[in-house]
Image (cartoon, rainbow, N blue to C red):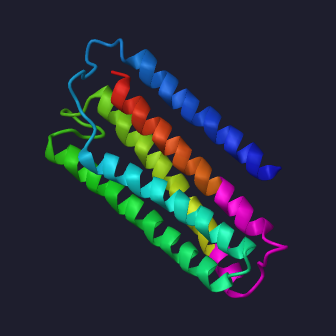
């Protein structure tokens, strides 16, 4: 139940930030022409694939194949790290275009984009920590076809982060 309380609280926080984004878009200094960096779209594809690999890990343990489960979990971990690398690459792309989080060349829109993406990265790091715990337990043989609650809870959080990022990237792409 605590996982769901956490997810609901995260939804409320991101709803607040995206609502503030919408309200702020009526300001005169709002930048209408700014596009998200390509790295954000690549990272979206990566996080979607990572959710699929987590699904495959869960499927493997249900089918009694712990080695395959471990392989899929390691793949998910690598994709999660790649997601974060691509996010920072996206920040670099925005900075190279002259957009900054704060300062004289920043805009309120860019500040929101940096903030929303950075806070999501923090939660993906939490997801990676959760994934490391799941992977550790998997390697120790604590999951099997009849007992895999920890893996399921970790997967639920990971899929939530995936869906949240898809929402955020679509929101930031289409809400101008």
Q: Quadrant of the C terminus?
A: top left
Question: Bounds of the magenta span?
Answer: 133-156
Quarter of the figure with residue 67: bottom right
Provide residue 39's location: percent of width, then percent of height: 28, 51
Is residue 20 part of the magenta span, yes or no?
no
Provide residue 89's location: percent of width, then percent of height: 27, 56
Looking at the image, residue 3 sits to the left or right of residue 28; the answer is right
- Residue furthest front as drawn: 63
Q: Which residue: 21% across, 49% down?
A: 93
Q: Is residue 11 above or below residue 57?
A: above
Q: Is residue 141 above or below residue 3?
A: below
Provide residue 77's location: percent of width, then percent of height: 51, 70
Q: Is residue 116 visible?
A: yes
Q: Which residue: 38% across, 31% down?
A: 172
Q: Which residue: 53% across, 49% down?
A: 162
Is residue 137 part of the magenta span, yes or no?
yes
Quarter of the figure with residue 85: bottom left
Quarter of the figure with residue 61: bottom right
């Amino acid at each position: 139940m605590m996982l769901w309380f956490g997810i609901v609280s995260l939804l409320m926080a991101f709803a607040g930030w995206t609502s503030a984004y919408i309200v702020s878009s009526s300001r005169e200094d709002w930048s209408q022409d700014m596009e998200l960096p390509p790295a954000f779209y690549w990272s979206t594809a990566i996080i979607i694939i990572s959710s699929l690999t987590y699904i495959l890990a869960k499927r493997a343990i249900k089918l009694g194949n712990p080695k395959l489960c471990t392989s899929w979990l390691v793949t998910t971990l690598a994709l999660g790290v790649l997601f974060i690398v691509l996010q920072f690459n996206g920040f670099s792309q925005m900075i190279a275009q002259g957009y900054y989080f704060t300062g004289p060349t920043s805009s309120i829109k860019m500040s929101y984009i940096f903030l929303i993406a950075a806070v999501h990265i923090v939660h993906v790091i939490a997801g990676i920590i959760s994934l490391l715990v799941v992977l550790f337990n998997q390697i120790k043989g604590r999951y099997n076809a009849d007992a895999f609650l920890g893996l399921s809870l970790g997967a639920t959080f990971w899929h939530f982060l995936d869906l949240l990022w898809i929402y955020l990237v679509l929101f930031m792409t289409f809400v101008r």
